[in-house]
Image: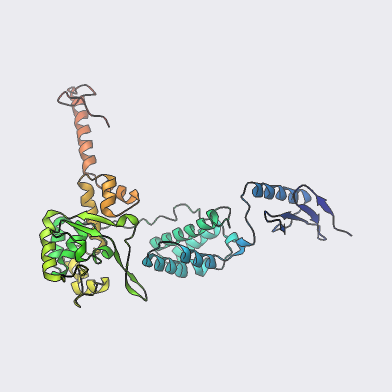
Amino acid sequence: MANKQGHRGFGSVRQLPSGRWQARYPGPDGVMRPAPKTFDTKRSAERWLSVTETQITQGEWIDPERAKRKLGDYADQWIAQRPGLRPRTVELYKWLLRKHIAPDLGGVELGKLSTAIIRQWRADRLTAGVSESVTAKSYRLLRAILNTAVEEDKILPRNPCRVRGADKENPDERPVITVAQVFDLASRMPERFRALVLLAAFGSLRWGEVTALRRCDVAEDASWVRVSRAMVEVPGRGLVVGPPKSRAGVRTLIIPTAVRRDLLRHLETWVKPEQDALLFTGERAGHAVRRPNFSQRTRWTEVVEKMGLKGLHFHDLRHAGNIWASKAGTSTKDLMARMGHDDMRAALIYQRATSDADKQIADRLSKLVDRHRKGTTPDDDEDQDGQPVPVG
């Protein structure tokens, strides 16, 4: 018996020998394609064609053949084609993909990824003992890759990474070292590294930034330091000089007067006269400092433990400097500039963590309430001296 066919304005439907219905339609390129599934009824097949026609008309149609591409292959290409990634970032992305994404999801077709699949993948990672931080980093990378598949390559209609809270790391609170403790820590370091500790703290510098500084990056009177590059440890390549972590990382920092003498003494004692000579080197003169060697030579872990600062990381020096800067009443814009951030979220975190100014406001409001309760409150729009209260 001949197959039953139905003709309509867009595409066509026909009944198969099995009794089910097949839909065919012309894509934007004019190529006739079958629907990815068959239908119980003719009406169901026609409804599917109507939806597909609308998607094509509105530019939302996705080529089902392109959606068959494996996530692992697409992710490899995504990393290779990202412009401006620092070497260390590339290595991190490759490691996250190889270790935490590809084993479970690498062989899945892009079009078959769903929120349920990704939710289960995340749960399996955590159950396997992967830290919340690494799992969140892996999720954010996966989401960024699939965003490109949606927005730029038009392979997917929407991003399936919609697991609430999966991108949050919730790291433990880092210890906050005091000014006195920074000087104490610096005094416990080998002399060649004393200024390194002070600069990292009072200049809010990252490890890669402070170890890449050269004589030409420091003012003659040590009043400022210019950050224009960073040292990055790349597996298989060793130390590589690259740009700072962000565009805003290129900056000039004013050095507090109180530590300039230490920096000048370091320049005179430990730095070669050439303008491109590194500020900080290992015992092999002229060679850049590597973090593992620094930790070993300074006995960092043992020193901070003796100081009662067990678990203190070198990066916590920058963290302390950012806290001090925020307590100085620095604006968000100025704090971002000193930190080398082009995203205000980090600056706002430090400002929210600094409650001194807010406490003063609360104390003043409390005094107003006390005077009100005692019946001695001046007019609402005047302060206790009878002067208008500033607004805004």
Picture quarter with the C terminus: top left
Q: Residue at x 61, y 61 (%)?
A: 66
Does residue 190 appear in the picture of this structure?
no
Question: 205 or 350: which is nearer to us?
Answer: 205
Q: Is residue 346 above or below residue 239?
A: above
Question: 223 or 334: which is nearer to us?
Answer: 223
Question: 76 or 129: which is nearer to us?
Answer: 76
Q: How many marks?
A: 0
In screen coordinates, is 170 left or right of 142? left
Q: Residue furthest right?
A: 1
In screen coordinates, is 4 left or right of 128? right
Colour mapping: rainbow
Q: Position of residue 24 (x, y in %)?
A: 74, 55
Q: Position of residue 388 (x, y in %)?
A: 20, 25
Q: Quadrant of residue 387?
A: top left
Does residue 270 appear in the picture of this structure?
yes
Q: Position of residue 310 (x, y in %)?
A: 22, 64
In screen coordinates, is 40 left or right of 367? right
Q: Residue furthest front?
A: 274
Q: Residue at x 24, y 47 (%)?
A: 354
Q: Is residue 383 above or below residue 262?
A: above
Q: Position of residue 313 (x, y in %)?
A: 25, 64
Q: Residue at x 65, y 49 (%)?
A: 55
Q: Is residue 381 above or below residue 106?
A: above
Q: Quadrant of residue 231?
A: bottom left
Picture quarter with the N terminus: bottom right
Q: Quadrant of residue 369?
A: top left
